Image: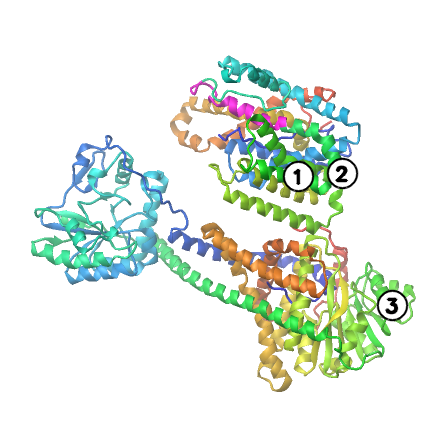
Amino acid sequence: MSAATVPAGTPVAPPAAAGKPGRDRYLDLLRTIALVRVVIYHIFGWAWLTILFPSMGVMFALAGSLMARSLSRPALGVVRGRIRRLLPPMWVFSLVVVPMMFALSWQPVKQDGLWWFVKLAWYVFPVGAPPFPWSSGDQAGLLEDTWAVQAAGPLWYIRAYLWFVIASPLLLRAFRRLPWATLLAPLGLTAVIGTGLVTIPGETGNALSDFAVFGSCWVLGFAHHDGLFKDVPRYLTISLASIVMGFGLWWASGHLTADGWDLNDIPLAQATWSLGFCVILLQYAPSWQELPGRLARFDRLVTLANNRAVTIYLWHNLLILATIPLIDLLWKIPYVDAHLGSTVEAGYTLLMTLVIWPLLALMIVAVGWVEDVAAKRRPRLWPDGRR
Amino acid sequence: MNSPATRGRNGRKKRKASRGRSRLRLPMRYLLPSTLLVALLAMLMLRGYVHSEILADHRVRDADHSDQVPKDVLAGGPVIDARSGDAKTLRIPDRRIVLTFDDGPDPVWTPKVLDKLKEYDAHGVFFVTGNMAARHPDLVRRMVEEGHELGLHTFNHPDLSYQSTGRIDWELSQNQLALAGAAGIRTSIFRPPYSSFSDAMDNKSWPVTEYIGSRGYLTVVNDTDSEDWKRPGVRAIVERATPKNGKGAIILMHDSGGDRSQTVAALDTLLPDLKERGYTFTRLTTALDSPSAHTPVTGFALWKGKAFVSAVAVSERITGVLVVGLAVIGALVLARFGLMLLLSFLHARKVRRRNFSWGEPLSRPVSVLVPAYNERECIEATVRSLAASEHPIEIIVIDDGSTDGTADLVEAMRLPRVRVVRQQNAGKPAALNNGIRHARYDIVVMMDGDTVFEPATVRELVQPFADPRVGAVAGNAKVGNRDSLIGAWQHIEYVMGFNLDRRMYDVLGCMPTIPGAVGAFRREALERVGGMSEDTLAEDTDITMALHRDGWRVVYAENARAWTEAPESVQQLWSQRYRWSYGTMQAIWKHRRAVIERGPSGRFGRVGLPFVSLFMVVAPLLAPLIDVFLLYGLVFGPTGKTVAAWFGVLVVQAVCAAYAFRLDRERMTHLLSLPLQQILYRQLMYVVLLQSWITALTGGRLRWQKLRRTGAVEAPGGVSAQRRGTGSVPERRPVG
């Protein structure tokens, strides 16, 4: 089971009613790939997936682009709208998870005093990543005792997204005045606070670090929306991107962690690799009205994933944990227990990969409609674009 | 590294791309080169594998508790028989010695050990590792022939207590495979790496011993450890090895893994001493009075072993060959860069001197030939750019049977000095020859239908003809569409090709190609060599070589700039480059007799031709070695040095490119795409060249003859119908 404390990205980019004209299916496809990648990564924990497709950077870049589009309207309303659409799905998640934690005897941390309760409030308004018990329940229980870590771990993304949304009006103004400086400033910040040069303790440090690591991707989304990619010769963007990515790999090679090449643990490598990767993806952005050729068959999946991105992201890790007791039911079948034991053992993660999708589907049906309510739309059970 | 003498000619790319045959060839062109590459990499992998660069595990576990090891084993003899549920141990009877040598065979020390054993008529057991046995099968064979026993010591010497049962099985079977391949036997005795005495068995190593027993092997540890690998001196080795009180013993020694001169010397003392005390030196099974551990291997298993051992032998050699190849190519590439820098510097200094001139300024009118086939999009711009020429010219557009109304378009422009000649579709060389027949003047400029001249281009291009020895002049073709990645790469290639390669060739007097996009010929010279020929796919290279052989000088005019559109898709680029490289080979082959001829032809044949062959045909063929070694070095190390070397070559490239850009006063920003060019573009060019080689070596000769007889590269019948399909609209596809 991979560490959920180092989660990958999510799509909180609130999908405008999918299927409407003007929706760029290329971006939708990228978001879907990013989501699937995150789920697979959290099942298998393969570090190289973070290099193959830096999901979080891509998600933030896409969200940045959409944010820039929305900000043609008055900023305050846009920011409020974004927050309104983000929070209700999060509350539903918190309503399930937090009582569970307390039921499994979660105690306030004494040293934190009152501050601990403030942190608890982050489950309601996540300006910080909400706290969680490192051990909950016991090892012999239905879920692993680290379930809370895994379930709540991905919430840092919600916090980062919230920060970006709130900072966007300012960031966009800065970007339009000083595009290159605004684009590269987060990289510089990462080089300072993400490399151990300066360490900022606590949740502030985490928040600032995430903001810096993915800030360039977010701003890159602005550039994409403003059509600036057309103004710079393609060879130049691609060449510079590859140089930046090369730097990222080099940096990573010198700062490998226990997980090896997992860029989630190497901030500066993550920032540079993600930025370069997004530059290439957005430079060649073909802007599809509909998915072309063979991709067309994934149309409904892409639509669904985009309409329920927040739901999928919030719940996937908890559901991955839930696959384990489900798969363990197999042992109750005498034949499996007697003959296929080692096969099941060997293919365990594969089985998890198979079981996770139906569980996600159930969760979409169960709580996905909250996303629609939050967006002031008619709630739908299964919004895959079919009419 | 290999900027082919760039030509800026892509008028024909469209015709080529639309030919049905080229589509059928597609799988083959990928298949052959990739097979070659895969085979090469597989060989390198095999080498890395037997040299423990792959899959090697150097961890060694510290001693653990031994409460789970049966007491009998801990207190027992050095031969552990765990084949049945209950483990038994065996001891060597008194006055018997089993000498054991681990980790070999080693090419230096094992023969010496074997010699000593032979000298004293002693036998022993060699616990060989699979990788060493596979690399030195002759020594394994010798051990068996001289009556020694062989034991397994795993394939590449890991501490088995760290390994899964699957890996242990694999270590054993690979070790047996090497023995089968080398000596045609299997063995049933085994010694675990890093083992010592029975009483050193612990909770971690015992399960391994049990498992190996369950696979049918006897595990053999030792009674006395000579510790010869520490090189403590001959006396210490002998002392540690010698058993007390005439007891039997298994003595542990090593014939591999470093300097074993002390081991060999110790044998010289140990063997006679112990012999004197009544000891015999036998194989393990002889000492235990049991049947031999060896069983002959037959049938498929034997062939599998032999195949493995021979593959290892090939891979051992192939790396040597590759290293030599790499050294050659490295030297060649650096020498070429050095020469290019030097000669292009000399050339630029010469032609840029203030008082430099080719002779009297040439101002008489010249003819400009524009062969065009379906150039609807570009032809107007081309002709208009010519009409603005500062030099007096007549313009002859030869329409080679276009189906898109190219000729009508030109006629409708109603420009003075422009003539349109129509002909049945017959290919570019025929169109040019037709144009030459219609040309009025004694100097003929040739260009492509999609190329645009500057007003000064023609004037600059024809000035060298003031020198009566000059037969042809190459202009400077520039890539117009350089903003895309593939365009930028070709831009770099063109700038280097024209400013370094061509200047070098100019100075050396062996310019291989007048670019089809911008070149000028003395009509008299053309007529003497019989005009354009259809013998090769590269008529421009062919004619240039013919002019050299006829004694004409061919020079480069740097200020005669022509702007051309480079292929935008990999497919188009592939077709274009395939024609160039295959055509160049054809032209070199066609003019091969120049090597033995007299006069100017011989001079070109003995200096220019080998030079051009070396740099345009041979060197690029070896160049992929650099990438193969880059990959190998990145994966198996030394990674740091490999990357450093790669960057070193990149810097040399960048310096040359920057100099070329400076000579042409181009903006340096395009050089930013140079690193990526080295990773993606260069390899594409290799594969194209390799493809040309394969064509030349397989069906090439045959097709050649056929080409000669039909007389046209482009089959006239039904071609236009095929062509319409793909059209001439370039695909604006991003670089793959």
Q: Looking at the image, is mark 1 or mark 2 earlier in the sequence?
A: 2
Coloring scheme used: rainbow
Q: Are the two marked residues, 2 and 3, in contact with CB atoms closer than 8 angstroms?
A: no
* Label 2 CA crowd tier, 10 Å (few <14, some 14–19, many 20+): few
From this view, report whether residue B478 is shown above or below residue B97.
below
Q: Residue at x 70, y 77 (%)?
A: B554
B238 or B75, which is in the foreground? B238
User: Residues at marks 1 and 3, common chain?
Assistant: no
Provide the residue designation for mark 3.
B387
Give the quarter of the image for residue A334.
top left
From this view, report whether residue B440 is shown above or below residue A163.
below
Element class at badge 2? helix
Q: Residue at x 41, y 62 (%)?
A: B317
Report the chain holding disc 1: A
Provide the residue designation for mark 1.
A185
Residue B721 lies left or right of residue B690; in this view the side is right
Q: Amino acid at mark 2?
A: Arg
- What is the span of residues highlighted in magenta in the rendered image? A138-159
